[in-house]
Amino acid sequence: MVARPGADPFVGARPVVGLAISLALHALVIVGAVTHLGSQRGPSEAPAREPTVTVLTLLPPEPERSSPDPDPEPAPPPPRPDAPALPPPPIPLPDRVQPVVPPQPATMAAPPAPTAEEWAFASTYTLKNSKAYRYTWGQQVRSMMGTAVEGPDQGMVRFRVEIAPDGRLTRLETLWSTSALAERLAREAIGQMPQWPPTPTGKPLIFEKTVSFSPFASEGPPLYRNDCLPDPPAFRNPYAWDGGSTRDPAPPEPAETPDPEALEDCLKQLPKDSIEAEMARDQRLMDRWGWSASQPRR
């Protein structure tokens, strides 16, 4: 199209410019509306994050080292392959087999016979049914029976003895025996003994005596320190009933109270106890009641 002289040169471009301006304005309006509407909405809710737990471990402080660390130990050498095991050398056999020797049985020699001084003391001791006389008589019998050997012949024998005032044996009765050899040896020893000293009280002396013929037991000397005290009353059941009397419990017998002056005179006559007597007493208590009997005040 050729413009005519004198005509407006922008007649054909005006519609295009107007359309472009109109589109720009619409675009601005749309952008503003979107921005305005987006500013009214709340912030988008983000997903909740999981809590993070941090564990703090406190280590103990290292001990102070007074000296520098020693040199590290060298690594052990690699193990060597095991050598093949060699058979043990043969055990040389003796030319002659030694016979097995059986163990020897236990033995106990006879105790020494009482001395003249011991018999003199026994013939004057009157307390507790002539205790010293009875012990010395048993020691004399055992000293004449010989050595006791472990085996079936060991044992004990108990006699009932009666001695006349002048020292003669008037009665000998076997109450029980656990060894025929012990009884035979004891009777032979009693028959070979000379006449004993007179009894301390001047009356017949009657007593029971056990003679032990064993390598594991021997009678030790007695203790005399309690001989001046009266014997404790024998126990009797207070509720025992004879079927005819009343059933009232019998009162216990009162303990006898010694005379102070007589007790003092008696204590002066007592001999001094020996260590052997203490050991024999403890052994008798332990054999009968066990170790608890050796405690004080028992």
Image (tube, rainbow, N blue to C red):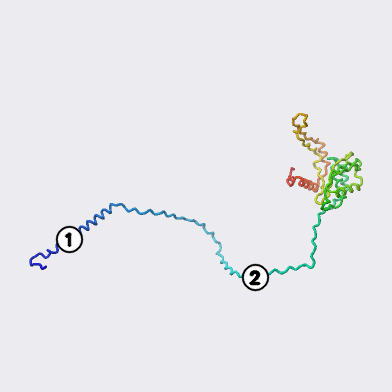
Q: Quadrant of the C terminus?
A: top right
**SS of the residue under disc 2:** loop
- Quarter of the image holding residue 223? top right
* Left or right side of 196 for 85: left
Look at the picture and state if 87 lies above or below 241: below
| Residue 141 in the image, given as x and y percentages of width and height | 87, 48
Measured as percent of width and height from the top left, residue 285 is found at: 77, 45
Q: Amino acid at mark 2?
A: Pro
* Residue name at image x 77 percent, y 45 percent: 288
Say which quarter of the image contains residue 10.
bottom left
Residue at 72% x, 69% y is 90
User: For mark 1, what is the residue?
Assistant: 19
The location of residue 270, given as percent across then percent down, is 83, 42
Q: Name the foreground residue: 206 vs 177.
A: 177
Residue topped by disc 2 = 84
Residue 264 lies, in percent from the top left, at 81, 38
Q: Quadrant of the N terminus?
A: bottom left
Q: Secondary structure at mark 1?
A: helix
Relative depth, front residue between 29 and 126: 29
- Which residue is located at x 15 percent, y 61 percent? 15
User: What amino acid is at disc 1?
Assistant: Leu
Q: Earlier in the sequence, mark 1 or mark 2?
A: 1
Q: CA distance from mark 1 to mark 2?
A: 110 Å
